Image: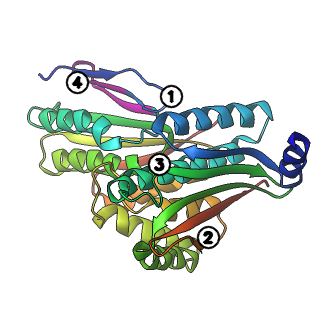
Amino acid sequence: MTYSYYKNMQLNNIIFVYQGEVTADLVSSILHMMENKLDGDGEDKKIKKKVFNVMVECLQNVYHHLDTLEVNVSDSEINDRTALLMIGKEEKDYYVITGNHILNNRIAALKSRLERVNNCDKNELKTLYQAILNDGEMSEKGTAGLGMIDIARKSGQKLGYDFHPVSEKYSFFSLEAKVARV
Amino acid sequence: MIEALKIEPTHKTPKVYFDPANNHFELSGRSIPEDSVGFYKKILDWVEDYGKTPNTKTEFKFELEYFNTSSSKNILELLKKLEKIHLQGQSAVQITWYYDEDDEDMEETGEDYKALLQVPLELIMKVY
């Protein structure tokens, strides 16, 4: 059993995987651990910075999302605030994958934001980022709808995403961001 | 003169060293707190107060290694307060935005801010 987990992770180039509740402390610990790992591997400083930045945004994005989800969750259907966090290193890219529950009625808006970001080239992302930075409203915790744009800018690649239906009320949203190892 | 504001850096929050008596204004290190609004409130309030009786010249140094998008909005607010002080003619504000030579993202962020502001902002590459 253990060996198959190990082999499976190795085959999929997974460095780190976590399934469970996401707290601020947990996010900090993962970032700290991954930073040490990147340092220890002697990763190029430029790549290291990009990977770290993308990890910060992806992980904090999940944390903030679950924090807002909490108020809506009173039914037993999805009574936890758990998520999946995964970091891997393939031949050409580092990848960060996050997965969390989302209310179905929020899918359309999120999907259109992701499509918008993926349809932008480098310069368009810059313009979009500046526009939202300057005009966008800020939520209580300072999240400003900049996260996805920032991830896309630093990643330099299209964002991968999926909405997997779970129930009438919820779906499981996954997001994948890559950073090239060149 | 307003009292200095000094906050020690942590692995998630930057070093804050605002010392009008010595004309030293610095924000450096990493700014990746989950709750950036909570962290920046004190800083923004301080700059607001400083703007009431500023030095004739204010040289403000940003030397950030990492920051999250949650901080980016607050940093813009901070820069806008400095811009206001500058434009009202109370103090000649000069902002310097440092970035590592291999950090194009931090350079771009500096450019983003420069594009949005009417306060002298110089981008300086740190070479090793």
Q: Name the chain letter of the residue that bears numbered label 3.
A: A
Instruction: Give the distance between the C-alpha atoms of the residues marked 3 and 2, in whole angstroms.
Output: 17 Å
Q: Position of residue B10 (x, y in %)?
A: 46, 25
Identity of the residue furthest to the front in this view: A76
Judged left or right of residue B28, residue B47 is left
Q: Name the chain letter of the residue that bears numbered label 2.
A: A
What is the crowding at mark 1: few (fewer than 14 residues within 10 Å), some, or many (at least 20)? few
Q: Position of residue A112 (x, y in %)?
A: 47, 79
**Nearer mark to the viewer, of 3 and 4:** 3
Residue at mark 3 shares a chain with residue at mark 4: no
Instruction: Give the distance between the C-alpha atoms of the residues marked 1 and 2, in whole angstroms.
Output: 30 Å
The colouring scheme, among rainbow, by chain, secondary structure or one colour, is rainbow
Instruction: Give the distance between the C-alpha atoms of the residues marked 4 and 2, in whole angstroms.
Output: 49 Å
Residue B2 or residue A52, whichever sits in front: A52
| Residue A161 marker | 2
Q: Which residue is mark 3?
A: A63
| Pointers 1 and 4 in contact (C-beta within 8 Å) | no
What is the crowding at mark 2: few (fewer than 14 residues within 10 Å), some, or many (at least 20)? some
| Disc 4 residue type (three-letter) | Pro
Residue at mark 3 shares a chain with residue at mark 2: yes
Q: Which residue is mark 1?
A: B11
Residue at mark 4 shares a chain with residue at mark 2: no
Residue B96 or residue A47, whichever sits in front: A47
Residue A131 or residue A40, whichever sits in front: A40
Magenta stretch: give its range. Answer: B16-28
Instruction: Give the distance between the C-alpha atoms of the residues marked 1 and 3, in whole angstroms.
Output: 18 Å
Q: Position of residue A57 (x, y in %)?
A: 52, 51
**Judging from the image, what secondary structure is the residue with disc 4 in?**
helix
Instruction: Give the distance between the C-alpha atoms of the residues marked 3 and 4, in whole angstroms.
Output: 38 Å
Q: Which residue is mark 4?
A: B20
